[in-house]
Image (cartoon, grey):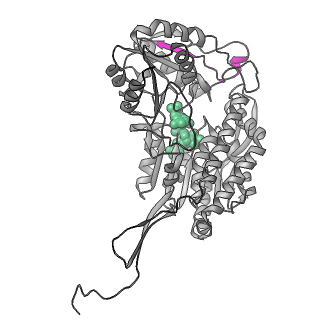
Amino acid sequence: MRGLYLAGRWAASDGGGSRLISCPADGTAVRSVVEGSAADATAAVAAARTAFDSGSWAALPEKQRGEMLLRTADLLHRDKARYARAEALDTGKRFVEAEYDIDDVVACFRYYGGIAGTDAGRVVDTGNPHAISRIVYAPVGVCSLITPWNYPLLQVSWKVAPALLAGNTFVLKPSELTPSTAILLMDTLTEAGVPAGVANLVTGSGPEVGAVLASDPRVDMVSFTGGLATGKAIMVAGAATVKKVTLELGGKNPNIIFADADVEAAIDYALTAVFLHSGQVCSAGARLIVDAGLHDRVVDEIVSRAARIRLGGPFDDAAQTGPLISAAHRAKVHAYVEAGVAEGAVLRTGGIIPTDGELSKGFYYPPTVLDGCTRGMTVIREESFGPVMTVETFTSESEAIEIANDTDYGLAGAVWTSDASRAQRVAGALRHGTVWINDYHPYVPQAEWGGFGQSGNGRELGPTGLSEYREIKHIWQNTSPAPQYWFPR
Ligand code: NDP
C-alpha cells in the first residue's frame, strides 16, 4: 500500500490508516492507499526541509533541473495509458478525457523544462561605475502543494513543474479521493533523476494532513487549488509564519452571447462550456448570459441537446460525460438546483438523480438548465461545481458586462460576437483572469492562469507561474570600496 513518499522512499504511516479508493462511476474498488496522519505530514515537511537546507538541489544549474522535467515529460508520455487509466478510475471521467489530461500534463512539464535557463534575472544600471547591481532569483524553499480531485494530475503538474524548476523542495497532498496518479508521479520523478527528499508525498485528508502542511513553520510557501472556504482557511493558517500563499479557488464564470454572434457555434460551445466533465471544472461557463432577443432560440436548442447528453463510465464508448466525484458532492449540486427552483428559476431539463439501471450505481447527475435566473439567486452567486447551467438575459452591452462582473469570483468568461470592436471592448471590461472570444476552454501552458477577486491570488502557468516559486534578490557589489567618512574619523 502506497501513499507516503519521504526522502526518496515509500514509507509506512506513523499512526495513520488506509483508505479504499473507489470509482465514482460504479463504486468498484480501485486501490487501497495510505491514509496519512499529522505525524506523517510533519515527517514529510522535515524531509523536504532537510533536502532544501542541504543546498544541493537549489545549487544545480537551472538547465539541469529543466532536463529532469523534460525527462519526466518523456516518461509520462511513455506511461500515458497507465496514468490515464488510473486517473479515469479515480475520477470516473471518460478514459479518452483522461488521456487528454495526461497530454496536458506532459505539455506542462515540457514547457517548464523548455524555459529552463532562459531568464537569469537582470543587471541594473546604477549610474555608478564602481557598482555591479544584479537582480537574481532564489527558490522560495519548502512548498506545500495541495490539490483537488477534478483534474488530479494536471493540477499537480501546474505546481510541481515550476516548483522544481525554481529549485524548491515540496510536499504534495493530492485530494484524498483521487491520489493514484500522484503516487505514480513520485516514481516517475525519481526515474527522471529528481534527488531523494526533493519530492515528497502524503496522501490523506485535508483536516489531518493538509492542515499541517498549511501551518508547519518550516514550510515557506503553500500553493493550493480547491474550494473557497478551504482557501481562506489556508491563508489564515499561513499567516502565523507569513508564508507565501497562492490560491486557485474556482469561479462563477459568465458566457455572454450577443445577438450578432455565430449562434450555432455559440450554442455548441455553451454546452461544452458548462457540461464538460459534468461541470466539475473551475472555469466552467455555468452562467449563460444571452441577449434577450436570442433567448428562446438559444435556450430551446441548449435544453434539447443537454437532455440528449449520454452519461456513462470511463470505458463506456457511448458515454459523453461521466459521474460526479462523490455522493456528498452530488447532494451539494442537487441542493443548488433545488435552491434555484425555490428562488424562482425554471427547471428546463435535468435536476433528477438517476435511480434506475447502470447509472444508479454511480454518482451521476444529469445536465441541468435553470432558466429565468436573476443575480440575487444562490445558484447564481455560489459555485455548484456540477452540470448546472443558469440562464440570465440582457438588453444592452453595458448590462451584459454588469451582470458578468457581478460576482465575488473572477476566474474566466467568454464573449460571443461577430463585432471585433465589441469583442475587445467587452473582453477588456470583464473582471476575470481569462477571457475567451468566440471560444471556450482552451488554454496553453505558456499563458498565465488564475483569477481576480475571490477566485484566488497569484497565477499558475506561463512565466508568472514560475515566478511564484521564486524569491527575488538584489545583489550589490562595490568594486572599489574606499572610506566615505559619513561619520568623521
Ligand atoms: P477542498 O477545498 O475541500 O479540497 C481541495 C484540497 O484541499 C484537497 O486536497 C483537500 O483535502 C484539501 N483540504 C481540505 N481541507 C483542508 C484544510 N483545512 N487544510 C489544508 N487542506 C485542506 O475542495 P473539495 O475537493 O472538497 O471541493 C469543494 C469545492 O471546491 C467544490 O465543490 C468546488 O466548488 C471547489 N473546487 C474548486 C476547484 C478548482 O479548480 N478551483 C477544484 C475542486 C473543487 P481532502 O483530500 O480532504 O479533500
Residue ID at (52%, 63%): 120
Asked if residue 380 lies left or right of residue 278, the reply is left
Farthest residue toward the bottom?
A: 489
- Of residues 287 and 422, the one nearer the viewer is 422
Farthest residue toward the left?
A: 488
Quadrant position of residue 155:
top right
Measured as percent of width and height from the top left, residue 255 is found at 46, 23
- Of residues 244 and 262, the one nearer the viewer is 262
Measured as percent of width and height from the top left, residue 16 is found at 66, 50
Q: Does 362 appear in magenta?
A: yes
Measured as percent of width and height from the top left, residue 102 is found at 69, 39
Asked if residue 3 lies left or right of residue 296, the reply is right
Residue ID at (47%, 61%): 471
Quadrant position of residue 446:
top right
Asked if residue 239 lies left or right of residue 185, the reply is left
Question: In this view of the protein, can residue 18 be seen by the observer?
Answer: no
Q: Quadrant of ligand 1?
A: top right
Asked if residue 217 lies left or right of residue 198, the reply is left
The magenta span reads: 357-370
Task: Judge whether 3 appears above or below 418 on screen.
Answer: below
Q: Does 276 appear in magenta?
A: no
Measured as percent of width and height from the top left, residue 96 is found at 72, 29
Quadrant for the C terminus in the image: bottom left
Total numbered circles: 0
Residue ID at (23%, 84%): 486
